[in-house]
Amino acid sequence: MKLFLLLVFLLESFSLWAQQAPSAGPGPAVTVEVSRTHALVRFVQTLAGDNNTYRGSRKAFEASRFNTPAARRWLRRYQSLDRDPGFDRDGYPAGRLGSVGSIMPSYLAASADAQDLPDLQRRTVGLLPNEVLAGLDSVYRYFTPAFDTLAWQPHAAELGRLRTAYADFLAKSQLMAKFGRLRTFYGSVWPDALPYRVLLTPQLDVKQGFNGLIFTNHATATGNLVLLDCHPNSRTFVDGTAVVFHEMSHTLSAQQRLALQQQVEGWYLHHPSPNGRYAYNLMEEAFATVAGEWIYVQQTGKVESGEWYFDDYVSRYAKALYPLMTSYVERGQTIDSAFVNQAVALFDQTFPQAATSYVNLFRKTLYWTNADDFQAAVQPFQDRFRTTFTYSSFPILNSAKPLSRAQSGEVLPVILITREHAATLKYLRANLPALRKQRLRPEQSFVLSTTGPSGPIILVNAHDAAQLTAAAKLLEKQGHLDPKAPLVELK
């Protein structure tokens, strides 16, 4: 499914608007909302390179007159704030979307309800420490002129003109009733009384597309929020709602009943195929892609002929799964062990080289670094390799939790050393047997891609920031683990 999203919504007096889109039959309600305060919060998140933000908008800012040394210092200050203290949920399978909790849905919901920045602080007292709230407020105020100039003022009038068409389309299509059938397949707990909130923000790189159409390609979901980065002139209703329901399907996965989540994990990981774990890692995006395509078919009567997703692995696996999963959806049947057995078999047939492909291995990643600027260190890899589930950890030395994850075999450890090279290499080699196969010199810059008792591992030893980018480009070019040349020196 092409990830194209239609933006159609109302802006009234540059403040919050919410339009209820009624649905017939079972299924949650949905609101479409826009808020200047929320858009400002997302704008700063995007500039800082947060996960699940639209890279095109960040690059548009970087090309603007507002991208100054002072602005970059403010972004580093933002990145240093402990603004999203996550927590693990006991009993949930590691790596599933529901296994990790976050305050971010509540914070973003508060930003959508807030009339201004002081109101946002009042609504989030207790959610984060006051020191963090004050720090966030100062960053938002610094970037307000750039936000108004680049994101808000140029698009407000056009966004306002698009409201009625989108609201009418949602009301007439009754897609939320169909969404209830997806909820049954996932075995999710999502009461009809709990509405989804679709929160819209403008993209900065608005360009004219094919036949005058303007598309968007970025959305994400968290809690009951669907965060859509939108091209203001978009008119692609059917493609747009397919993206919305793709993202909403992720929330159904996160809210799958705990006992069923545990069963699903066991069905995949205890499968006799060595690719059971890889099929499990790809499950989230593949299921959501099938769900979005099914919603598309409900409106058009046929599947799309091209790519369904911008990631080749996800697109191909979703196409292989489509007949199986949609048969369950149409019958009102919940995922079971028979489904998983067939899904793993389809993965085996579709991806015979999965065990060495970086596109596949990066699905579930631990980024572990001692770089002073964590986001800058991992950004070159995040720009080139998509992950379904990402762990991030700092520092390296004597860090028990990331070491345990690196030893588990459940994730691909991507370890980035930028300082204390000798001590860090010694510590890692003592604890990760895969690193002992090669002679690793602390003074040398290199990329090591190898496999050990716990599975694949990637180690980058870099002496300047440019070498991290070079390492990411090298891995992208190679495309897969090469056991004949695991160690490559960086210039």
Image (spheres, rainbow, N blue to C red):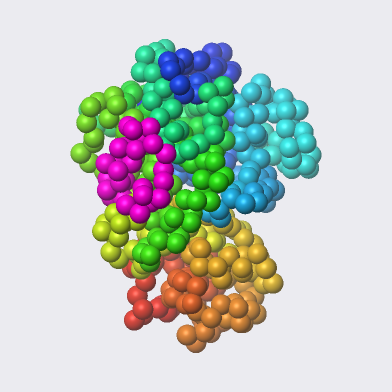
**Range of magenta residues:** 315-342
Q: Where residue 406 sits in the image (x, y, percent)? A: 56, 68
Whether residue 362 is visible to the viewer of this picture, yes or no, is: no
Residue at 49% from the left image edge and 54% from the top image edge: 265
Q: Can you say which quadrant of the picture contains the C terminus?
A: bottom left
* Front-lying residue, 470 or 368: 368
In which quarter of the view is residue 399 placed?
bottom right
* Residue 335 part of the magenta segment: yes
* Placement of 7 over or under 475, stated as above or below: above
Estimate the x, y position of residue 305 in percent, counting from the top left: 20, 39
**Which of 43/288 is in front?**
288
Residue sitting at 44 percent across and 67 percent down? 471
On the image, which quarter does residue 110 sit in? top right
364 and 193: which is toward the camera = 193
Residue 430, how many percent across, how many down?
A: 61, 82
Instruction: Spot the residue most to the bottom.
Output: 439
The N terminus: image quadrant? top left
Lateral position of residue 21 relative to residue 118, left or right: left
Most common SS among magenta residues: helix
At 22% from the left and 41% from the top, the residue drawn is: 306
* Residue 400 falls inside the magenta stretch: no
Percent x, y for residue 217?
Answer: 38, 37
* Image point (30%, 46%), residue name: 321
Q: Is residue 340 above or below residue 215?
A: below
Residue 105 visible to the viewer: yes
Q: Observer-nearest residue: 323 or 250?
A: 323
The relative height of residue 320 versus residue 187 in the rendered view (above or below) is below
Question: Relative to 280, does residue 212 appear above or below in the rendering?
Answer: above
